[in-house]
Amino acid sequence: MTVNPSGWRPTQPSNDAIADGHTVTGNRALMLEEPLIFEIGSTEQTGVDFDHGLPTTPKSSRLGGLERNRAIGLPGLSEAEAVRHYTRLSRQNYAIDLGLFPLGSCTMKHNPRLNEKVARFPGFADVHPLQPQETVQGALAVISELAVWLLELTGMYGVAMSPKAGAHGELCGLLCIRAALEARGDAREVVLVPESAHGTNPATAAFAGYRVENIPANEAGRVDLDALKARLGPDVAAVMITNPNTCGLFEPDMKAISDAVHGAGGFVYCDGANFNAIVGKVRPGDLGIDAMHINLHKTFSTPHGGGGPGSGPVVLSQALSPFGPLPFVARHGDGTFRLVEEENASEEHPHAFGRMVAFHGQMGMFTRALAYILSHGADGLKQVAEDAVLNANYILRSLEDVLDAPFAKSGPCMHEALFSDKGFADDVNTLDLAKALIDEGFHPMTMYFPLVVHGAMLVEPTETESKASLDQFIAAVRSIAERAKAGDESLKAAPVYAPRRRLDETLAARKPILTYREAQAAQAAE
Amino acid sequence: MTVNPSGWRPTQPSNDAIADGHTVTGNRALMLEEPLIFEIGSTEQTGVDFDHGLPTTPKSSRLGGLERNRAIGLPGLSEAEAVRHYTRLSRQNYAIDLGLFPLGSCTMKHNPRLNEKVARFPGFADVHPLQPQETVQGALAVISELAVWLLELTGMYGVAMSPKAGAHGELCGLLCIRAALEARGDAREVVLVPESAHGTNPATAAFAGYRVENIPANEAGRVDLDALKARLGPDVAAVMITNPNTCGLFEPDMKAISDAVHGAGGFVYCDGANFNAIVGKVRPGDLGIDAMHINLHKTFSTPHGGGGPGSGPVVLSQALSPFGPLPFVARHGDGTFRLVEEENASEEHPHAFGRMVAFHGQMGMFTRALAYILSHGADGLKQVAEDAVLNANYILRSLEDVLDAPFAKSGPCMHEALFSDKGFADDVNTLDLAKALIDEGFHPMTMYFPLVVHGAMLVEPTETESKASLDQFIAAVRSIAERAKAGDESLKAAPVYAPRRRLDETLAARKPILTYREAQAAQAAE
Amino acid sequence: MRYLPLSDADRSDMLRLVGASTIDELFRDVPGEARLHGPIAGLPMHASEMAVERHMMALSRRNMVASDVPFFLGCGAYKHHIPASVDHIIQRGEFLTSYTPYQPEIAQGTLQMMFEFQTQVARLFGCEVANASMYDGSTAMWEAILMAHRITRRKKTVISSGVHPHYVSVAKTMAKFTEDALDTALPELVAETDVERLIGQIDGETSAVVVQYPDILGRIADLAPIAEAVHSAGGLLIAVVTEPVALGMIRSPGEMGADIVVGEGQSIGVGLQFGGPYVGLFACREKHVRQMPGRLAGETVDAEGKRGFVLTLSTREQHIRREKATSNICTSSVLCALAFTAHLTLLGEEGLRQLASVNHARACEAAERLAAIPGVELVNDSFFNEFTLKLPIEARPAVHAMVERGVLGGVSLGRLYPGIEGLQNGLVVAVTETATNEDIDALEAKLKEVVR
Amino acid sequence: MRYLPLSDADRSDMLRLVGASTIDELFRDVPGEARLHGPIAGLPMHASEMAVERHMMALSRRNMVASDVPFFLGCGAYKHHIPASVDHIIQRGEFLTSYTPYQPEIAQGTLQMMFEFQTQVARLFGCEVANASMYDGSTAMWEAILMAHRITRRKKTVISSGVHPHYVSVAKTMAKFTEDALDTALPELVAETDVERLIGQIDGETSAVVVQYPDILGRIADLAPIAEAVHSAGGLLIAVVTEPVALGMIRSPGEMGADIVVGEGQSIGVGLQFGGPYVGLFACREKHVRQMPGRLAGETVDAEGKRGFVLTLSTREQHIRREKATSNICTSSVLCALAFTAHLTLLGEEGLRQLASVNHARACEAAERLAAIPGVELVNDSFFNEFTLKLPIEARPAVHAMVERGVLGGVSLGRLYPGIEGLQNGLVVAVTETATNEDIDALEAKLKEVVR
Ligand SMILES: Cc1ncc(COP(=O)(O)O)c(C=O)c1O
Ligand SMILES: Cc1ncc(COP(=O)(O)O)c(C=O)c1O
């Protein structure tokens, strides 16, 4: 109960208090500081209870004489403290739920809450991966329904559902290719990757035992077809193309590229991270692609969760399908489902290159993605691609007069708009603009990627942003861009309103502190 | 993907940017401004879908010719925008989940998440109040299990479960009293209420058709027993006592008060809002009380939700039980349950004063409260009261040297510590201290209540605060109290970090704007 | 205990600081004989989360879940699909675990939401202003009667026979004590509402007429004639809406002249929950706002001139006015109001219209088919998503018989009006967007069985 | 479509601004013949939330729910009670809908949580450092083998027969392509693990020995002798933990000399979910950190000197190092890591110890009772909450027979090692705190039935 009997009325107050900006607690109203669990918890404290009279270890423990004889040092918190700890931490994060998160190449779209609800149905959340198959027909049905949709949407022949993320999908695709080549006794050791490719492409190729060579881009930001053709040969196992590419552009020569690669006896891997731009509009299968991963956590909106979990199913051409990994789900005439695993592979799938994960892939992501796909339907998914592309072009055309847009002349972009720092005052860079955007209440765009553009700024708004949200973002970027060109020093101070000012990454890397040590307590307290 | 190739390292930047503190968007990093739905939504936009080929109104509509012929003016938002709108709004709130919320008399304790989960079990959440009783035995069992616990904990004879909140429970209690008096043909028209009582007490007495008279407190902050006795007489229907009272003190003479009131033919109503202080330690039934409401949203932790829903069951003495309202749950020998409603009241409960609500009360709060009670058990509930009282005394003794604590001399307090603004510089008041606490990251205590203390500050930490949290609060209050005594003008500017500076309540009341009018758009935009 | 942060070490440190040697010293004001020693005997001790969850789950499984069977109950509580995002929103800790917004600088989230809610309710009801919620529809109706009484200074209220019987009994209960005179009647199984009777009862003493729209039997009648009659007698018209979704298709009471419109908001955003918590809606004319009960959020500015919201006109309320307050209400139903406003914002006008059409269409279809059952008559000429059937047998046993066949087939008037001649054969059937074709088939089949 | 904010009006305004007359003009880089016109034929159109929810609910009901029956499956995925607050925490939009923390100033929530997680994992495993998560235990094990290979510049890895067969086949699959040599073997239904064999296989070429602790049959063996042997040969010891709850009672692999400890974190905070998403745990010695795969959060200061956290040592990672990166991993399993760290923070050391004791006690009880069934032998001398029985019949049909009797009685080795002589009668039974006395009674009764 609160009243204001004094009838006090506010008058414009001084801002000194802000300027000096110190509070006893270090908090700033709703921007709350939060210590580490190691600083507030204790090893005696716990936030769980056990029932009275529960059996505790019997006299004859069966631990093989390896009973713990040292403390672990795990602090506990009561539930009241734990909920508060994580809630306060969460408030130091930016997220899609808070505003525009135009991180290029990451497809940060709205995560529907229906999908969270569905994934938590006991029939999905509380089922063991090794339950007898007659007890998990619903789970197998989900995997198979989703697989059918992915095949229809991509026009491909087969799909491997078990990869756990995009990079894992890349690996799956390359291993299929390798298996296919080895099956024909053709040992090739090179994979060609455009300079503009995402880091996981070359890393994956190396991980799969291949040597990586770059292929150049032309000035229109596309793969240089002639250069590519020139390099193709009997040693090239595969070409990894991202389409739409990381400059946010569609590769118009895709079919020609595929034909050339196939002509040279290689395979075409497509990085499908940007599938959101073309879902329901173009089917990679029609472009001669042999393998493509789909990031369910991008195109199909399973939440990124601060860095996963994701899911990276890989669609495969007829040529590669026989080599796909185990296990997978087979559907019987009678509508029942069966897992094809090591034991029955010999009959049903003899050329499988092997197994990528312990169980069946990211079931919790499959349920979400399927709910997402069913919600949109064929019409809604097409609209997704169209709106994503429209939003990106709207940003491109609304900013190209204040920010250098290297490929804007070459026509429309797809789902992301790419800018460079050309024209900024010497001492101002892309990082400064990004940090200033933080103060404006936006997450920055992807910075310094792709590497082919100087001080790259890759903006992917996605289809779930309203025009009003884009307009506000554009206004903010325009004003910051002007300041960047004018060399406004105050940009260096940004962000000023975030939970932290700029952080010293170099220090972190020079003297890594990766875990909490009690010794620090003192130091931290200083 | 973000890197910092420039290898840039931060140097202490200037704070000018903060001082001028302007952004294009009005946002301050994670402190985001949010317009009204009427400013961002449109009547064509919607965040729900309907299936294709769903029947729409047939030719022959049956609406009695009253089809709508005007627009309503309800804006819609896509789900993406709606989730963001409410998430951004939520971030402008303080809450228990964020930190200490020591609002005296409100018992802002941790709300366990188990209770939220349990209340959402389909068997509780998705059951209609008029389902045949054989289909709701589980719901009736919950009501009856909770009723048994409330009776055991209070040592009373009967309980009315249907009241929707504390004030509604007060009404229920007074109506029982009135019915009991009328049943003995004794029409009394006065209810005595201490000055320190919560506003709902006199308001309820009036609502029930009684005349209210105040009874004074003694300088120890308790009811003045002699004054009370002197006033008792044939016209006094009831005395409403809050115990522990709103000064956070136990009424040691409670039994004597009850005896005196009973001696004079009246009844004793106890406001149980402060039951948290004594649950498991004292049973009101042992103190001669006739009726007491229990705020399940206080003592038994059902979430306050920004102002309800609550639940206010009323426990009754043997004398009043026959008059309790309908409906209620009766338990049969065979373990089944039956509702006693108007139809069967004549046999089973002929003296019921009537019905207070359409259905059976706050089922969704009953499930939460029962889960809370079962979790604590008899031992845990006792601990709740002890820790709540310990925390309050810890605050009282840690602050009494810097803040005037009018009743501190008279001994320990119960679950809340009361302070006054005595000793503040003339132009600084309780409101200023409260607003400064906001900047420190705390919710202020209850201000200006109870009315018996000048510039009252009523601090109720509850048992779910850790010592560390109390210590931080104490440190903050101490420093602000010093500034208040020193007459530090900057307190008038507080809060400076909250989503809003102080708001003009007088303006709001002088020209009430209670709904959005499109005309405002312009004005708001200014 | 998992919810309690204090360790025994903390406890003894703190006891030392407060100068007590035992915790019981802090309870010394409690007379010794009243003080309990040790946990209350005979009660169970604390339990693990798992144990409590299992116990509650077992209890919940003793209820028949509306979504698990063909379901057709209404009469003041309606089953609609609630978008998953609504539940996510109301579980945000900043909404769920905050208090009534007494400190506006750190409660703008709740205050702005209240302001938006008030505006939506006012527009939906066709009124100028609305408050930030009451307990439920039944208590809101009584508060409306009292408010009219304060405005007109008259004590006689005429209540339509179409008003929900539980709402009427709440009013009767209160009126006993406030000495308000209520003129009530029982409904009849006929197509017309009691407009005639109401108009006939109005006189110079009449404070207000109370009408439910659509009424308890699902009938829809024009309120304009009643408004005219009561206004010309110097009284007020109070309309009660228990199914606000209907207002997506039919005229608002405000448009037809109602002075105060109250309602039950459950059917938008709030689950059935066996009857509570629900959310009372309360709207009226601006000129009467100072007589209104409950919380009000209002727009203002902060010290920097930024728009903000505060609780306002609190001089109506108990915490300021005490016994002179317009009501004793304090805690109301704000979290349910949030669910209501979030769901209505997701719907928007377009979505609400579509939702209403689907409901009406489904109900029309069901009505036709059920009325075709030999011996079964449709009472209503007009209805939205709920109508009344006259069965050839008593409806109450018929409902139980349908339950045995796995169908929750409606609310019998025998349950609502026990022992009232002439109503025993009445069955009120509500059909919303959640009823599938299979559900309607099942109802038709089972009802046929039980009435034959 | 409910998730799409653009109205048709917005779309045409925006098209005008970008200077396109139709949306397809923006797709002009797509060769005409490849462009689809209209929604893909034969696929359903968009559906309401209610319809999708019902479809998914129907599918979910075709699964047998672990909590609805007596349940005893383990072998790499364990059913433990997860506090409700954990799910609340991971549904906070600021965690759920954020990306890998590339902008540390507005990602301190995720970064601090990672730092806390890394510390908890390192301490639990008895290592100096841990990363911020891998996909799961099986992929983490392969990454550990590769890491050892980078450190020792050797290609031969000896894998214990007690390692989960799926983990082994993931490693075999990868090794085919990286030309790592894996020395593997099949387990036997005996009380001892293959320590002898492992030590015997170690030579100067050995990069690492990989041991699971407790192993696939639930056996627990001291790792110290193996550590000694492999260290003296210049190799590393990799330990795999699939049931981290065990470490509340038994010694950590780090203490016993393991250089790299990887594990599956599912059993703390993450539900069974039919196998994923789970969370890979990865810990090692500080001196090897630059060879570690995956994200690492590190402590630093901001421009005002305040402590803060950032992603660090990213020069190990693909986005900087490309083909020279230590791994290709990018998105990992941070939200599951949050669930893990939140659950472990709720437990604390005391809670973890109690949880482990309850698990062990229940398992001991069940083991005794099941071993008493005529013809059934307990294979293990040592175990934590999981042990292997040797049945008088093949275990796989026995498991199906128990399902028909409503009991999920364990994992048959026939499922994990199809067609392998000598393992077909093995049944691995996991007993956690979620198994009630009634559950154990049911298992005993049904197993008796099916083996007789
Ligand atoms: C173009 C591209 N390829 C591959 C990846 C890797 O996908 P994931 O992070 O799911 O492993 C990403 C994700 O950032 C990407 O943007
Ligand atoms: C002492 C006291 N009495 C009564 C009430 C009214 O309870 P409720 O808000 O649940 O109606 C309150 C709540 O603030 C209170 O503090």
Image (cartoon, coloured by chain):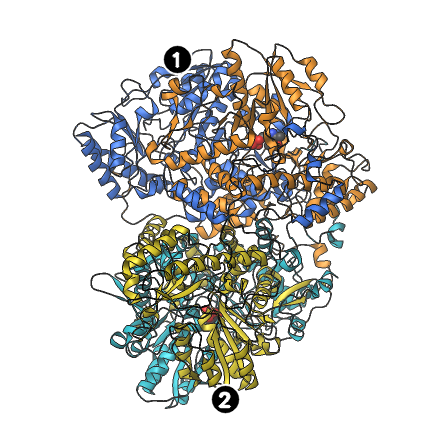
Chain colours: A orange, B cyan, C yellow, D blue
Q: Does residue D63 show up?
A: yes
Q: Which callout, 1 or 2, points to the residue nearer the camera?
A: 2
Is residue A336 rendered to the left or right of residue A254? Answer: left
Specify the quadrant of the image occupied by residue C235: bottom right
**Crowd rating for badge 2 (residues with CA inside 10 Å; few <14, some 14–19, many 20+):** some
Question: Residue D201's mark?
Answer: 1
Q: Which of D200 and B93 is in front in this view?
A: B93
Q: Ligand 1 near label 1 (Cβ, under 8 Å)?
A: no
Q: Where is residue D199 in the image (x, y as percent from the top left)?
A: 38, 15
Residue drawn at x 47%, y 11% as measured from the top left: D205
Mark 1 belongs to which amino acid?
A: Gln
Q: Position of residue A385 (x, y in %)?
A: 62, 38
Say which element carries label 1: helix
Task: Using the image, name the chain to which the residue with label 2 belongs.
Answer: C
Question: Residue C205's mark?
Answer: 2
Q: Ligand 2 near label 2 (Cβ, under 8 Å)?
A: no
Q: Where is residue D258 in the image (x, y as percent from the top left)?
A: 44, 25
Q: Does residue B267 show up?
A: no
Q: Quadrant of the C terminus of chain D?
A: top left
Is residue A201 rendered to the left or right of residue C383? Answer: right
Residue B391 vertical position relative to residue D390 in the rendered view, above or below? below
Q: Position of residue B94 (x, y in %)?
A: 56, 58
